[in-house]
Image: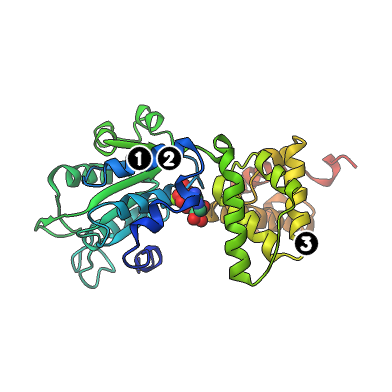
């Protein structure tokens, strides 16, 4: 059992220059609301206050978390990101707080948690709404006492880490449903930064598009240009995947030979108000893609077996090793119909 991947992959290059992150033109200079965010970051630079960053997926929450760290007195210390949605819930406590040898099956040796790695630096808890209730309670204690114990350990360890959290979920709603602790909410929400979606700061689109274009041209050794009409369309497009979608689209444009047409087609469809208007290039996370893949595979197998046994459901359930009832449910879920019932 290894959860090491989180550490190295998400660690930023050592010692980022404050200026690079905070005043890099594409991040904070393009729109008054982003400039306001920069002011907030500057005004809390000399404090250790907890920060909650909110906004849709792809708006730049991670970048802002790094900027908060880079602007702070802790900038020479580590910046550790933990994505609470990406780690199986059963492993999350040990991931955050570490464990002692023998704490659970597979815990062959003592392992420090991310809070320990974040010592003298910042810990960035992404997708905080996915934290299970029991861990919410533990986190609240950590934020109050600056102490915690490893899983399976008795001794208390001191924490010297600043906590920055982020979410794209409606925490207030999660609270009313009892899924998010109110006390933790208030403890995290000392300073709240709301990052507007890209469609509410369209002025930034040309600057961002040019910046990504230059970056990917340099990276892939190309000299792609944007036609002024294309740029105008990009500015009108809905960008429900926010800056991440724009970044992906610019990468496509640079990498594909017919990239320009691909981008044209997408933004034109968007402008004409078809479904693409609100559909980003990639709307789903890997987990959803995997789930959809599994559903499709299941449906295909079901269909093949049913055809093969001429819709003898009892036989199909034996072949597919599921109960008769499960098979009927699956048939219904997949919307499959015996040939006689199908419209020809
Ligand atoms: N203002 C910006 N300037 C340059 N790149 C940006 C900006 N905002 C977001 N990005 C890029 O867009 C992608 C999504 O940003 P990220 O911070 O991961 O969003 P979130 O955490 O809100 O989902 C990242 O690749 C990031 O580098
Ligand atoms: Mg993020």
**Of callouts 3 and 2, which one flags the residue occurring earlier in the amino acid sequence?**
2
**Of callouts 1 and 3, which one flags the residue occurring earlier in the amino acid sequence?**
1
Q: Which residue is mark 3?
A: 258
Q: Which residue is mark 1?
A: 39
Q: CA distance from mark 1 to mark 2?
A: 6 Å
Quadrant in which the C terminus appears: top right
SS assignment at label 1: helix
The answer to whether mark 1 is within 8 Å of ligand 1 is: no
On residue 305, the disc is: none
Q: Are marks 1 and 2 in contact (CB under 8 Å)?
A: yes
Indicate the position of residue 265 as horizontal and vertical percent values: 77, 49
Is 29 left, or right, of 177 in this rendering?
right
Residue at image position (72%, 64%) is 256
Visible residue check, residue 283: no
On residue 35, the disc is: 2
Indicate the position of residue 32 as horizontal and vertical percent values: 47, 36
In the image, residue 291 above or below residue 17: above
């Amino acid at each position: 059992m290894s959860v090491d991947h989180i550490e190295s992959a998400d660690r930023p290059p050592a010692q980022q220059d404050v200026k690079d992150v905070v005043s890099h033109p594409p991040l904070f200079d393009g729109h008054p609301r982003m400039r306001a965010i920069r002011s907030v970051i500057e005004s809390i630079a000399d404090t250790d206050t907890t920060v909650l960053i909110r906004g849709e997926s792809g708006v730049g929450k991670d970048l802002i978390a790094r900027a908060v760290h880079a602007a702070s007195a802790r900038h020479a210390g580590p910046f550790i990101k933990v994505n609470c949605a990406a780690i199986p819930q059963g492993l999350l406590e040990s991931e955050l707080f570490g464990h002692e040898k023998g704490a659970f099956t597979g815990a062959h040796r003592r392992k420090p948690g991310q809070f320990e790695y974040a010592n003298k630096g910042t810990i960035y808890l992404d997708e905080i709404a996915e934290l299970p209730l029991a861990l919410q309670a533990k986190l609240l204690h950590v934020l109050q006492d600056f102490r915690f114990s490893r899983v399976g350990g008795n001794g208390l360890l001191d924490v010297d880490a600043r906590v920055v959290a982020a979410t794209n979920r409606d925490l207030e709603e999660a609270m009313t449903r009892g899924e998010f602790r109110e006390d933790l909410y208030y403890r995290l929400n000392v300073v709240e930064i709301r990052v507007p979606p890209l469609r509410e700061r369209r002025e930034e689109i040309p600057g961002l598009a040019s910046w990504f274009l230059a970056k990917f041209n340099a990276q892939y050794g190309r000299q792609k240009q944007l036609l002024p009409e294309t740029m105008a369309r990009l500015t009108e497009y809905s960008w429900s995947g926010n800056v991440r979608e724009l970044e992906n689209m610019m990468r496509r444009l640079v990498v594909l030979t017919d990239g320009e047409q691909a981008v044209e087609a997408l933004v034109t469809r968007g402008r004409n108000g078809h479904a693409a208007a609100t559909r980003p290039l990639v709307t789903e996370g890997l987990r959803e893609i995997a789930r959809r893949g599994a559903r499709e595979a299941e449906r295909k197998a079901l269909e093949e077996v049913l055809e093969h046994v001429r819709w003898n459901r009892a036989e199909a359930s034996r072949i597919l090793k599921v109960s008769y009832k499960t098979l009927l449910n699956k048939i219904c879920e997949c919307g499959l119909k015996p040939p006689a019932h199908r419209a020809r």
